[in-house]
Amino acid sequence: MKLGVLVSDYKICVETIDRMKSDNLGLVLVQNGVYHAVLKEGGKESSLLGKTPRLYVLSEDLQSRGLSAEQVDKRVKVIDYSGLVDVIFNDFDKVAWL
């Protein structure tokens, strides 16, 4: 099963994602979750970046927080709302929101 998880909280409990069983996990960083793609907490990258090679961040949420695509970690693909719809319908069998 291809599972897409929309992460909307910066202080999300990583253990929740670790407990999700999926053959193919993808994370979409939205709302305050976009901080996982750009900020380094205590000099370290977000632990979410190592959970899966399928990482996306919503460009509109970056912009509304004063961040730019140039600040995003190279492992994370920047998408817009249209791209989000494509990812949800084409890349995932199920979607969860955290």
Image (tube, helix red, strand yellow):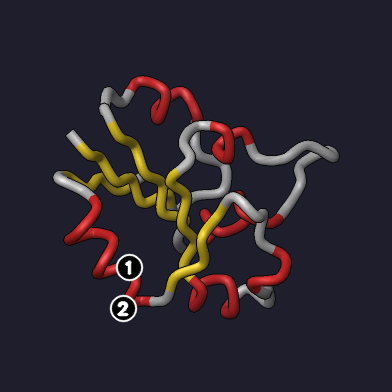
> Eyeballing the image, is 52 above or below 20?
below
In which quadrant of the rendered image does the N terminus lie?
A: top left
Where does residue 39 sit, x and y in percent of width and height? 72, 53
Q: Amino acid at mark 2?
A: Ser
Compared across the picture, whether 45 is left or right of 33 comes to right
C-alpha separation, residue under disc 2 versus residue under disc 1: 5 Å
Where does residue 94 sit, x and y in percent of width and height? 16, 44
| Nearer to the camera, 98 or 40 | 40
- Is the C-beta separation of discs 2 and 1 under 8 Å? yes
Residue plotted at (48% across, 40% down): 53
Q: Which residue is mark 2?
A: 82
In which quadrant of the rendered image does the C terminus lie?
A: top left
Where does residue 22 sit, x and y in percent of width and height? 26, 28
Residue plotted at (58% across, 71% down): 62
Q: Amino acid at mark 1?
A: Leu
Q: Which residue is mark 1?
A: 84
Residue at disc 2, secondary structure: helix
Residue at disc 1, secondary structure: helix
- Mark linked to residue 53: none
